[in-house]
Image (tube, rainbow, N blue to C red):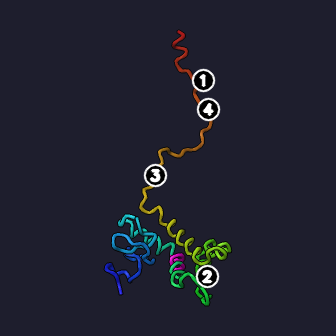
Amino acid sequence: MSDVNGQPAGMCAAYGCPLFGTVGSESRWYCFCHVNKPSNFNDAITRELRERQMHIVESTLDLRRHACSFYGEDSAYRAIQQRLISADRRDLLMSAHEKQNGGVRAWLLRLERTLIDSVADIGIQQRIPTTVPTAPVIGPTHASDFLPYADDEAA
């Protein structure tokens, strides 16, 4: 079963997005990364998710598929751990604090926040610096004692 734009049912309405559609907007369902972003940036967001963040995307999908519970499903939990470790993202493993307070749901929220932060700058024009970076100044920095016409006025 597929949606109007060719995406499988339940997936984000942005073409090619690998995440589930979780937020309704304009009679379509978008993922938390695409929602409230101009549609002309959909491709850039999807590219970021697919090329640089796929290990986190797959982990969030696995967490949602297991209904935020790994009771009797240790292999799925271990698969997520191995995926994050192999991507050198040990900082995204479930913390002891999350195990005690909120469990898998707290971990899922942190992974989703990481994805949101990774695409937050897409579509926002970066400021152009108004100053030109220069090397440090060597020598006098003030001209308070410099009076080039002092001799002419005295004459």
- The numbered mark, 3 or 1, whose residue comes first in the sequence reads 3
The tag earlier along the polypeptide, 1 or 2, is 2
Circles 4 and 3 in contact, beta carbons < 8 Å:
no
| Residue 82: mark in rendering | 2
What is the spatial separation of the Cα atoms under label 2 and label 4, in whole angstroms?
59 Å
**Is the magenta region chiefly helix, strand or loop?**
helix
Q: Which residue lies furthest to the bottom in this view?
A: 72
- Residue at the left extreme of this rendering: 4
Which residue is identified by label 3? Answer: 127
- State which tag comes first along the sequence, 3 or 2: 2
Sequence-wise, the earlier of marks 4 and 3 is 3
Q: In this view, does 83 lie to the left or right of 20?
A: right
Type of amino acid at the residue the image marks with label 4: Pro
Q: In which quarter of the image is the N terminus?
A: bottom left
Three-letter amino acid code at disc 2? Gln
Mark 4 neighbour density, 10 Å: few (under 14) some (14–19) many (20 or more): few
Secondary structure category for the residue under label 2: helix
Q: Distance between the residues labelled 3 and 2?
A: 39 Å
Would you say 12 lies left or right of 97 here?
Answer: left
Residue 94: image location, x then y, percent: 63, 76
Q: Observer-nearest residue: 65 or 143?
A: 65
| Disc 1 from disc 2: Cα separation | 68 Å
Does 58 lie within the magenta span? yes
Q: In which quarter of the image is residue 122?
A: bottom left
Residue 10, quarter of picture: bottom left
